[in-house]
């Protein structure tokens, strides 16, 4: 509850048997071609019951006049224990070469195809979904 006099506030959450602390880790920054750059982020968020939710985020930037402008944001939530383990490994070990190859050769072109559109088509979303899933399933 905000203090009307100072505008400050406090949050108090009792900790039960399960603890989950959200975080973001930037695990890769790469320029796949002139004028573009992407960042890959591992994200752990938490449910109210302190269950972990793991995601891999791909943000595409266009570089113009020395400025980075974000043009596409892709967030992939893991669906299987294998995918969760792959994202967890990325958080501790970084992006492995086979994963980087998929990010550069499949995710980047699929994300770039969405640039300038008001929204992604079903086909574009499927292509991005499949490419992001491949990042997490490729043998490392």
Image: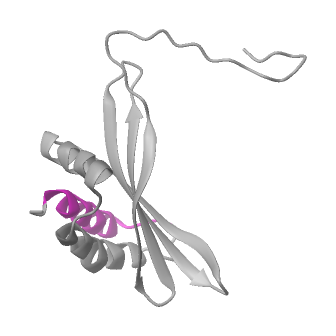
Residue positioned 20% across, 50% down in the render: 86
- Is 20 situated above or below 126? above
How many numbered callouts? 0
The range drawn in magenta is 119-137
* Residue 41, x across and y down, in percent: 40, 56
Residue appearing at x 90%, y 17% in the figure: 5
Quadrant placement of the C terminus = bottom left
- Residue for point 39% across, 30% down: 46
Magenta region includes residue 128: yes
**Which residue is located at x 33 percent, y 36 percent?**
53
Q: Position of residue 83 (x, y in %)?
A: 18, 48
Q: Position of residue 69 (x, y in %)?
A: 60, 73
- Left or right side of 92 for 60: right
21 or 103, which is in the foreground?
Answer: 21
Farthest front residue? Answer: 93
Q: Quadrant of residue 138?
A: bottom left
Against 14, residue 96 (above or below) is below
Q: Quadrant of residue 63?
A: bottom right
Extreme right residue here?
5
67 versus 72 height, above or below: below
As drawn, is 101 to the left or to the right of 56?
A: left
């Amino acid at each position: 509850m905000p203090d009307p006099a100072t505008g400050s506030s406090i949050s108090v959450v009792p900790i039960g048997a399960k603890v989950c602390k959200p975080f973001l880790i930037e695990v890769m920054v790469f320029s796949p071609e002139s004028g573009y750059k992407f960042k890959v982020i591992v994200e752990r968020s938490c449910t109210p019951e302190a269950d972990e939710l793991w995601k891999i985020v791909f943000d595409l930037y266009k570089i113009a006049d020395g400025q980075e402008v974000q043009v596409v944001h892709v967030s992939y939530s893991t669906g299987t224990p294998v995918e969760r383990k792959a994202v967890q490994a990325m958080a501790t070990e970084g992006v492995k070469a086979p994963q980087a190859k998929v990010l550069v050769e499949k995710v980047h072109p699929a994300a770039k195809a969405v640039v300038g559109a008001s929204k992604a088509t079903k086909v574009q979303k499927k292509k991005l979904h499949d490419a992001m899933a491949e990042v997490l399933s490729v043998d490392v």
